[in-house]
Image: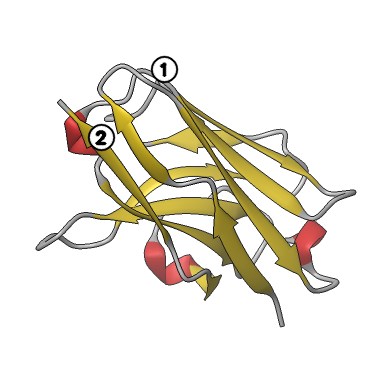
Amino acid sequence: QVTLVESGGGLVQAGGSLRLSCAASGRSFSSRAMGWFRQAPGKEREFVAVISWSGDTTNYADSVKGRFTISRDNTKNTVNLQMNSLKPEDTAVYYCAAARGFYAYNALAQYEYWGQGTQVTVSS
């Protein structure tokens, strides 16, 4: 069992930055890949970024590549998403998720546990 709690969302102007954090409880955190997803109003939940269990491998959606950076600290059971050069189209609820296994999956079906989400709003 893994419980995830996101924080760090808010309102920011276009071009600004936010740092999302996800705190995990549960002994299996360090053996799971961790991902960030987002869901905008009226749209399906979509992949944003993922980091493998060791932190050696990361993968990003094309829409955020070069602007967002995912990282993790297995000693603190946390995963972060640094978001720079934010755009209005980044506005969404952002979810932290724990995968079923080690590797850097980007498919929703590979994720077993989800946080409650944190709202990110980017104004133009």
Q: CA distance from mark 2 to mark 1?
A: 18 Å
Query: In the image, 11: left or right of 5?
Result: left
Q: Is residue 111 above or below residue 123?
A: below
Q: How is the image coloured?
A: secondary structure
- Tag of residue 66: 1
Query: In the image, 80: left or right of 109?
Result: right
* Residue identifier under label 2: 122
Quadrant in the picture for the C terminus? top left
Q: In the image, what residue type sits under mark 1?
A: Gly
Residue 104: where, in percent of width, then height?
57, 47
User: What is the secondary structure assignment of the residue under circle 1?
Assistant: loop
Q: Is residue 51 above or below residue 3?
A: above
**Residue 85 appears in which quarter of the rendering?**
top left
User: What is the secondary structure assignment of the residue under circle 2?
Assistant: strand
Residue 10: where, in percent of width, then height?
40, 44
> Which sits in the foreground, 76 or 119?
119
Residue 65: where, in percent of width, then height?
38, 24
Query: In the image, 52: left or right of 82?
Result: right
Quadrant in the picture for the N terminus? bottom right
Neighbour class for label 2 at 10 Å: few (<14), some, many (≥20)?
many
Counting residues from the start of the chain, the first of labels 2 and 1 encountered is 1
Residue at 43% across / 63% down in the picture?
Answer: 117
- Tag of residue 100: none
Residue at 66% across / 47% down in the picture?
Answer: 79
**Residue 67 appears in which quarter of the rendering?**
top left
Q: Are marks 2 and 1 in contact (CB under 8 Å)?
A: no
Neighbour class for label 1 at 10 Å: few (<14), some, many (≥20)?
few
**Residue 27 appears in which quarter of the rendering?**
bottom right
Please identify the residue farthest to the bottom as the structure is shown: 1
Residue at 73% across / 51% down in the picture?
Answer: 78
Residue at 27% across / 61% down in the picture?
Answer: 45
